[in-house]
Image (tube, helix red, strand yellow):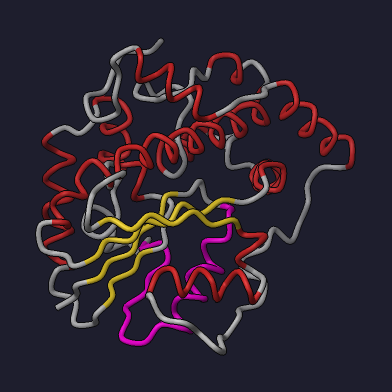
């Protein structure tokens, strides 16, 4: 039965496939998944549309709690020592709000906040057109019209697809800060903050693996580039537009979370739109 678990908080386009391969190739006795998106996984291993929509509208409702109870009951019986899921979906549908269910029987629960240079993530998202279709944002990222969010999306929506993509990345950085605070001081939780630009280096990868396992790694298998955005659909002027957007929406996640909490708000209870 698994006693050690690892999950991620990440916006995606942040090196999750690389992280998956790094863990898969260097940890023994570990069952390692990337995003579990096969047609039979939604609603069982991965939240489905109802979980994304309801958590980001209502908060941690009974519907969400039921999903996590079923999921954690299933993974409790993993035969490997480690059960690992590197997925940006889970934290956007109540993973942390329900992590206490896992703490009740786990020896260790590792939460990895995986990040990457903001401009690189924004450029990747706009070239994939992920924020051009609201049907996609309802299901796989976060929709700017969701009411249960930390950052007000309205100023960003005025800037079209580029602005909405930037709002999403800022919202996820704020959620990482918000959840970091929520997890502080819990004895079974091990929190790790990683940056892809450091993780792809042998020294950074060794340090991360040592921090997770408690063991030194003299040699490791370092994966090559994974899941790169190979086709750019925009020219250099669009890149400059991205840079100006980031400069125009300067933010500090800790201050935004402070403001959110000072209003007496939390994601578990949901809220009306600002």
Q: Is residue 43 left or right of residue 191?
A: left
Hey, which quadrant is residue 234 in on the image?
top right
In the rendered image, the vertical position of residue 9 relative to residue 200, given as above or below:
above
Q: Is residue 268 left or right of residue 192?
A: left
Determine the residue positioned at 67% across, 60% down: 197
In the rendered image, the vertical position of residue 269 relative to residue 83, given as above or below:
above
Q: Nearer the viewer, residue 178 or 155?
A: 178
In the rendered image, the vertical position of residue 171 relative to residue 256, given as above or below:
below
Determine the residue positioned at 41% across, 81% down: 215
Q: Quadrant of the N terminus?
A: bottom left
Outermost residue toward the right in this view: 236
The x and y percentages for residue 89 are: 39, 50
Q: Nearer the viewer, residue 177 or 270?
A: 177
Q: Nearer the viewer, residue 271 or 212?
A: 212
Hey, which quadrant is residue 148 in on the image?
top left
**Magenta part of the chain:** 13-36
């Amino acid at each position: 039965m698994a006693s050690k678990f690892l999950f991620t908080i990440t916006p995606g386009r942040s090196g999750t496939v690389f992280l998956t391969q790094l863990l898969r190739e260097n940890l023994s006795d570990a069952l390692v998944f990337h995003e579990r998106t096969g047609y039979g996984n939604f609603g069982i291993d991965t939240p489905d549309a109802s979980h994304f929509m309801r958590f980001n509208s209502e908060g941690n409702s009974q519907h969400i709690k039921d999903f996590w109870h079923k999921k954690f009951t299933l993974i409790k019986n993993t035969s490997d020592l480690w059960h690992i899921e590197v997925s940006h979906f889970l934290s956007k549908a109540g993973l942390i709000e329900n992590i206490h269910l896992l703490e009740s029987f786990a020896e260790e629960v590792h939460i990895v906040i995986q990040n990457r240079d903001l401009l690189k993530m924004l450029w990747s998202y706009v070239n994939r057109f992920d924020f051009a279709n609201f049907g996609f944002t309802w299901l796989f990222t976060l929709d700017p019209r969701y009411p249960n969010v930390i950052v007000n999306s309205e100023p960003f929506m005025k800037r079209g697809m580029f602005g909405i993509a930037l709002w999403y990345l800022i919202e996820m950085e704020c959620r990482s800060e918000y959840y970091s605070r929520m997890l502080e001081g819990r004895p079974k939780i091990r929190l790790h903050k990683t940056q892809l630009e450091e993780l792809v280096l042998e020294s950074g990868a060794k340090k991360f693996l040592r921090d997770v396992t408690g063991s030194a790694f003299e040699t490791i298998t370092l994966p090559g580039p994974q899941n790169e955005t190979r086709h750019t659909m925009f020219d250099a002027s669009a890149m400059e537009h991205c840079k100006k957007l980031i400069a125009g929406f300067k933010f500090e996640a800790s201050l935004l979370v402070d403001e959110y909490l000072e209003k007496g708000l939390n994601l578990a209870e949901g809220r009306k739109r600002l």
